[in-house]
Image (cartoon, rainbow, N blue to C red):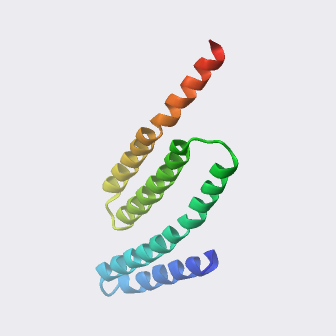
């Protein structure tokens, strides 16, 4: 399925949810959540391509594994946090969604600390 198919499925779910809003609004929310989970799980299958590409880069360039692992973790955190925050906001709980986004940003910052330390060490070795 391509982006066109995913976009069409998402739009169909939203249009159907709008129609269900007049009957039972919670059914529309459930439908949109189910569509979101479907798209999320399909998106997770695309991580294989990312992992294979990063492994190819690592095999061709002498890069420490911790840096590539950190990139993968950061991508995963961003993807999951954005998905969860979007679902919360669509369900009318924007405050919870904003907190998930904030926690995701802090998690990315925490995970990226080894890369930051490596950068500082590299700069120190060049300077002195």
- Work out which quarter of the rendered image holds the C terminus and state it: top right
Q: Is residue 91 above or below residue 121?
A: below
Q: Position of residue 72 (x, y in %)?
A: 51, 53
Q: Is residue 122 above or below residue 2?
A: above
* Residue drawn at 35 percent across, 76 percent down: 29
* Residue drawn at 53 percent across, 79 percent down: 11
Frontmost residue, 21 versus 89: 89
The answer to which quarter of the image holds residue 50 is: bottom right
- Work out which quarter of the rendered image holds the N terminus and state it: bottom right
Frontmost residue, 9 versus 121: 121
* Residue drawn at 44 percent across, 44 percent down: 108
Q: Is residue 40 above or below residue 18?
A: above
Q: Position of residue 30 (x, y in %)?
A: 33, 78
Q: Position of residue 42 (x, y in %)?
A: 50, 74
* Residue lying furthest right: 60
Q: Is residue 123 left or right of residue 73?
A: right
- How many labels sit on residues? 0
Q: Is residue 27 left or right of residue 6?
A: left
* Residue drawn at 52 percent across, 71 percent down: 45
Q: Is residue 30 above or below residue 109?
A: below
Q: Position of residue 83 (x, y in %)?
A: 43, 62
């Amino acid at each position: 399925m391509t982006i066109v198919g995913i976009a069409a499925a998402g739009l169909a779910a939203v249009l159907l949810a709008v129609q269900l809003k007049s009957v039972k609004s919670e059914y529309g929310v459930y439908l949109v959540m189910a569509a979101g989970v479907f798209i999320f799980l399909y998106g997770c299958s695309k991580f294989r391509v990312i992992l294979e590409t990063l492994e190819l880069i690592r095999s061709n360039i002498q890069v420490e594994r911790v840096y590539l692992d950190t990139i993968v973790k950061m991508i995963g955190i961003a993807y999951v946090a954005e998905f969860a925050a979007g679902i919360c906001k669509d369900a009318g709980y924007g405050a919870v969604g904003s907190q998930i986004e904030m926690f995701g940003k802090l998690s990315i910052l925490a995970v990226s600390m080894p890369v930051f330390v490596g950068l500082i060490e590299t700069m120190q070795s060049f300077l002195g």
